[in-house]
Image: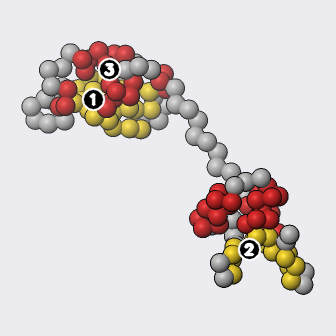
């Protein structure tokens, strides 16, 4: 049952749990992380109605669009003086084929480049690239 102090209504963790159906642990985590504004009085947390509204009115982050393989080109590059090779590939399959032909794979890295902006999105060790993309 919420506590009334004049015109102020305070909701405890138990109140929020009952009202929202969210676990008490999750609510306490939100309070500690500052996702929901609250005050701790003694050992109990209290939330105002205004803080609850703020939480629900807050815009949620928009998830980043999933990257498509065809949006990128790949540059296989030697990473030290022993290997100065650089090859550009259009597909992940080409990259994996080139890397599998190398005697010492640890001497290479792969740059993932956005075709539209020419921006390097990721630089990955060759072995990690193969592990990430070999089965996809």
Residue at x-position 85% and y-position 71%: 2
* Nearest to the observer: residue 101 or residue 32: 32
Disc number placed over residue 95 in the picture, else none: 3
* Nearest to the observer: residue 11 or residue 63: 11
Residue at x-position 18% and y-position 20%: 102
Question: How much space separates mark 3 and mark 1, taking CA atoms?
Answer: 11 Å
Q: Residue 104: x, y in percent?
A: 15, 25
Q: Which quarter shows the C terminus?
A: top left
**Is 8 above or below relative to 128?**
below
Q: Nearer the viewer, mark 3 or mark 2?
A: 2
Q: Find numbered disc 2 in the image and state the secondary structure of the residue it sits on.
A: strand
Q: List the residue tagged with mark 1.
A: 127
- Residue lying at the far right in this picture: please name it: 7
Q: Find numbered disc 3 in the image and state the secondary structure of the residue it sits on.
A: helix
Q: Quadrant of residue 44?
A: bottom right
Near mark 2 (Cα within 10 A), the count class, few <14, some 14-19 or many ≥20, is many
Q: Find numbered disc 1 in the image and state the secondary structure of the residue it sits on.
A: helix
Give the mark nearer the N terminus: 3 vs 1: 3
Side of 76 where 44 appears, left or right: right
Q: Are marks 3 and 1 in contact (CB under 8 Å)?
A: no
Q: Which quarter shows the N terminus?
A: bottom right
Q: List the residue tagged with mark 2.
A: 46
Q: Residue 128: x, y in percent?
A: 31, 32
For the rendered model, the colour scheme is secondary structure
């Amino acid at each position: 049952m919420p506590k009334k102090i004049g015109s102020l209504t305070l909701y405890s963790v138990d109140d929020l749990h009952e009202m929202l159906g969210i676990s008490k642990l999750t609510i306490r985590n939100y309070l500690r992380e500052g996702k929901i504004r609250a005050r701790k009085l003694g050992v109990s947390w209290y939330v105002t109605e205004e803080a609850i509204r703020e939480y629900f009115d807050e815009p949620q982050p928009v998830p980043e669009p999933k990257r498509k393989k065809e949006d990128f080109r790949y540059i296989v590059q030697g990473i030290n003086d022993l290997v100065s090779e650089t090859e550009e590939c259009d597909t992940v399959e080409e990259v994996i084929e080139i890397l599998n032909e190398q005697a010492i794979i640890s001497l290479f890295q792969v740059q993932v480049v956005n075709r539209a902006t020419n921006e390097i999105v990721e630089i990955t060790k060759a072995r990690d690239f193969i592990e990430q993309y070999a089965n996809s």
